[in-house]
Image (spheres, helix red, strand yellow):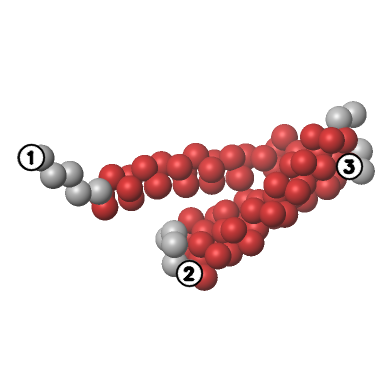
Amino acid sequence: MDYGYFIAMLVLGIGSIPMCYIFYKEKLAPKWLALWGVIGYAVLAFGFLMELFGKEWSMYLLILGGLWEITFAIWLVIKGRKNKIITVR
């Protein structure tokens, strides 16, 4: 078993929950996207906590967090593109 990887992913999941909560509270991202992140990372952290106890659940519980990361990246690209003003001289 690779306990180092499981602990690192557990810390990632737990540490990302406050980040998504700040996105929600400060309205830095749409509410649905921020809440999806909170739920996705909580599920991810739970999955890796179960891995530490010998239950092989993490691969199934990674899906929600992984899809959030892809969706959030696409949202950032689109939002950044809308707000950028290009001037030609």
Judged from this view, the residue extending furthest toward the top is 1
Counting from the top left corner in percent of width and height, residue 4 is at 84, 35
Quadrant assignment, res 6: top right
Task: Please give the label number shown on residue 20.
Answer: none
Q: Residue at x 36, y 42 (%)?
A: 77
Considering only order in the chain, which callout, 1 or 3, is on the residue closer to the N terminus? 3
Q: How far apart are the two marked residues, 3 and 1, measured between alpha carbons?
A: 59 Å
Q: Are marks 3 and 1 in contact (CB under 8 Å)?
A: no
Quadrant assignment, res 74: top left
Q: Nearer the viewer, mark 2 or mark 3?
A: 2
Q: Nearer the viewer, residue 28 or 60?
A: 28
Local SS, label 3: helix
Local SS, label 2: loop
Q: How far apart are the two marked residues, 2 and 1, measured between alpha carbons?
A: 36 Å
Q: Residue at x 88, y 42 (%)?
A: 52
Q: How far apart are the two marked residues, 2 and 3, measured between alpha carbons?
A: 34 Å
Q: Nearer the viewer, mark 2 or mark 1?
A: 1
Label 2 neighbour load within 10 Å: few <14, some 14-19, many 20+: few
User: In this figure, which residue is indicated by the disc labeled 2?
Assistant: 26
Counting from the top left corner in percent of width and height, residue 81 is at 28, 45
Q: Judge whether residue 43 can be spotted in this image.
A: no
Quarter of the image where the C terminus is located: top left
Q: Nearer the viewer, residue 79 or 30?
A: 79
Label 3 neighbour load within 10 Å: few <14, some 14-19, many 20+: some
Judged from this view, the residue extending furthest toward the front is 89
Label 1 neighbour load within 10 Å: few <14, some 14-19, many 20+: few
Amino acid type, label 3: Leu
User: In this figure, which residue is indicated by the disc labeled 1?
Assistant: 89
Amino acid type, label 1: Arg
Task: Please give the label number shown on residue 52.
Answer: 3
